[in-house]
């Protein structure tokens, strides 16, 4: 394969209309590969993370090294994108992910979703299948995936004060281990999460799935990854549990696992059927 380490192309698209319009920042790396029809890599970040994070940058570096197309973007209210973070919901951020895919129009994709991005990846697969148009999914790599986290991980653990804050103010705050600013969870996010549940029946991804999950993750317990497996086709899924792995899974050894999982999807997709 040839490779290029030039900077990815910065683009902006507008999603939504009127007072719902927001500008979404994209970094797109064109393919420079001799392998025909190699899938592009699409980064789907987590709650309050952005496309300049360690794992997103490492995915892009892998694409540059291997000559693959790579697409990163920030959800509205995140990073370089416009829009009000407090208006963010799974439906809103899914709409933006679909718009980015439509704009880039790759023939096939490997989705790389981290934390909440794993939920967006699963919903994106469902929406692409429902539409019957768009790229073919060659695979998914889900890192500490948090599908249905508002329903399964937040709502059951709300304190009386947090429930009161949701009722009276429409949101509640909690300290963040990753930022000096508190995490903000809105009533709209939680209510919309119920409409986007995926852990309710078999999830037809139409592609192989590799889950990377830390067993020392304080935010998304590894039991959640085991629960997700129950809803995915058994012959298409690999689960890697990292005994001392945290939620970020950004150590060098974790990054190596992520890259290996991504390349396994790319290589399998590029290998002709015998």
Image: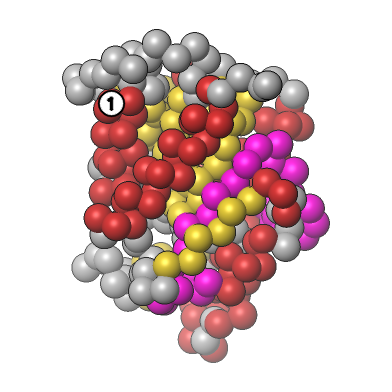
Residue 171 in view, yes or no: no
The residue at the point 34 percent across, 17 percent down is 1
Q: How is the image coloured?
A: secondary structure
Asked if residue 22 is among those painted magenta in the image, a careful observer would answer no
Say which residue label 1 marks: 64
Picture coordinates of residue 258, whole percent (x, y): 39, 48
Based on the picture, tell me whether residue 213 belongs to the magenta stretch.
yes
Q: Secondary structure at mark 1?
A: helix
Q: Looking at the figure, which quarter contains the C terminus? A: top right
Q: Position of residue 90 (x, y in %)?
A: 57, 49
Residue 175's image quarter? bottom left
Instruction: Give whichever of 183, 67 is nearer the camera.
Output: 67
Q: Residue at x 42, y 56 (%)?
A: 47
Q: Position of residue 196 (x, y in %)?
A: 67, 52
Q: Residue furthest bottom?
A: 160
Residue at image point 26% right, 34% down: 61
In the visual, does 38 lie left or right of 6? right
Give the prevailing secondary structure in the magenta stretch. Answer: loop
| Picture quadrant of residue 216 | bottom left
Total marks in image? 1
Horizontal side of residue 25 vs 265, given as left or right: left
Above-or-below relation of 14 to 226? above
Q: Nearer the viewer, residue 224 or 188?
A: 224
Q: Is residue 213 visible?
A: yes
Along the horizontal axis of the image, is 126 left or right of 117? right
Spot occupied by residue 255 in the image (x, y as percentages of width and height): 32, 51
Q: Is residue 5 or residue 44 the one in the foreground?
A: 5
Farthest residue toward the front? 274
Q: Which residues are magenta?
A: 196-222
Residue visible at 44% across and 31% down? 41
């Amino acid at each position: 394969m040839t490779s290029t380490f030039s900077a990815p192309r910065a683009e902006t698209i507008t999603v939504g209309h009127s007072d719902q319009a927001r500008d979404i920042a994209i970094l797109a790396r064109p393919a420079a590969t001799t392998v025909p029809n190699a899938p592009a890599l699409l980064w789907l970040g987590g709650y309050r993370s952005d496309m300049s994070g360690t794992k997103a940058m490492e995915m892009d570096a892998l694409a540059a090294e291997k000559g693959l197309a790579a697409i990163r973007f920030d959800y509205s209210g995140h990073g370089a994108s416009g829009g009000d973070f407090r208006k963010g919901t799974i439906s809103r951020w899914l709409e933006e992910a679909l718009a980015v895919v439509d704009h880039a129009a790759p023939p096939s994709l490997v989705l790389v979703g981290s934390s909440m991005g794993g939920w967006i990846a699963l919903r994106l697969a469902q929406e692409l299948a429902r539409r019957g148009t768009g790229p073919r999914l060659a695979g998914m790599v889900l890192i500490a995936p948090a599908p249905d986290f508002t329903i399964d991980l937040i709502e059951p653990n709300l304190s009386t004060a947090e429930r009161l804050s949701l009722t009276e103010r429409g949101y509640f705050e909690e300290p963040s281990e990753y930022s000096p600013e508190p995490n903000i969870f809105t009533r709209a996010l939680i209510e919309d999460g119920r409409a986007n549940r995926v852990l309710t029946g078999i999830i037809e991804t139409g592609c192989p799935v590799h889950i990377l999950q830390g067993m020392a993750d304080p935010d998304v317990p590894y039991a959640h990854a085991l629960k997700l497996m129950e809803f995915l086709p058994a012959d298409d899924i690999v689960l890697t549990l990292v005994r001392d792995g945290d939620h970020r899974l950004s150590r060098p050894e974790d990054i190596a696992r992520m890259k290996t999982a991504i390349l396994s999807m790319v290589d399998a997709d590029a290998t002709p059927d015998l």
